[in-house]
Image (cartoon, rainbow, N blue to C red):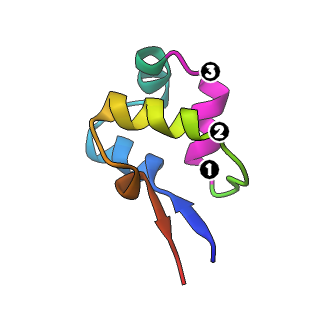
Amino acid sequence: MPVVVKLKEILAERNMSQRELARLTGLRPNTISHLCSNGVDRVHLSTFEIICKTLNIELHELIVMED
């Protein structure tokens, strides 16, 4: 079952740039860019935790399982 990371959509809804999220989280801009692409194959759970805390969202809002 493919997993889709909705970070690009969440940032668009908030009018937030990838660079701004990188600055707020302390994550590398390349990491944020990778998560906004369609080719996400692996991510550390701690990365998702940092993003969720920063954006004040739940994990299920960030990643979605597709049939």
Whether residue 66 is situated above or below residue 20 in the rendered picture: below
Which label sits in the foreground, 3 or 2? 2
The residue at which mark 1 appears reads as 37
Which label sits in the foreground, 1 or 2? 2
Farthest-out residue, bottom: 67
Judged by its main secondary structure, the magenta piece is: helix
Compare marks 3 and 2 and give the one earlier in the sequence.
3
Circle 3 — which element?
loop
- Mark 3–mark 2 Cα distance, whole angstroms, equals 13 Å
- Image position, residue 12 (x, y; %): 35, 45
Neighbor class of circle 3 (other Cα within 10 Å; few <14, some 14-19, many 20+) is few
Please name whichever residue, 32 or 45, is drawn nearer the observer in this view of the structure: 45
Neighbor class of circle 1 (other Cα within 10 Å; few <14, some 14-19, many 20+) is few
Please name whichever residue, 14 or 44, is drawn nearer the observer in this view of the structure: 44
The residue at which mark 3 appears reads as 28
Circle 1 — which element?
loop
- Kindly identify the amino acid type of the residue bearing the numbered disc 2: His
The residue at which mark 2 appears reads as 44
Whether residue 25 is situated above or below residue 1 in the rendered picture: above
Q: Residue at x 45, y 47 (%)?
A: 7
Whether residue 36 is situated above or below residue 39 in the rendered picture: above
Whether residue 39 is situated above or below residue 12 in the rendered picture: below
Please name whichever residue, 15 or 10, is drawn nearer the observer in this view of the structure: 10
- Kindly identify the amino acid type of the residue bearing the numbered disc 3: Arg
- The residue segment tinted magenta is 26-37
- Mark 3–mark 1 Cα distance, whole angstroms, equals 15 Å
- Image position, residue 32 (x, y; %): 57, 33
Q: Quadrant of residue 30?
A: top right
Compare marks 1 and 2 and give the one earlier in the sequence.
1
- Label 2 near label 3: C-beta < 8 Å? no
- Kindly identify the amino acid type of the residue bearing the numbered disc 1: Ser
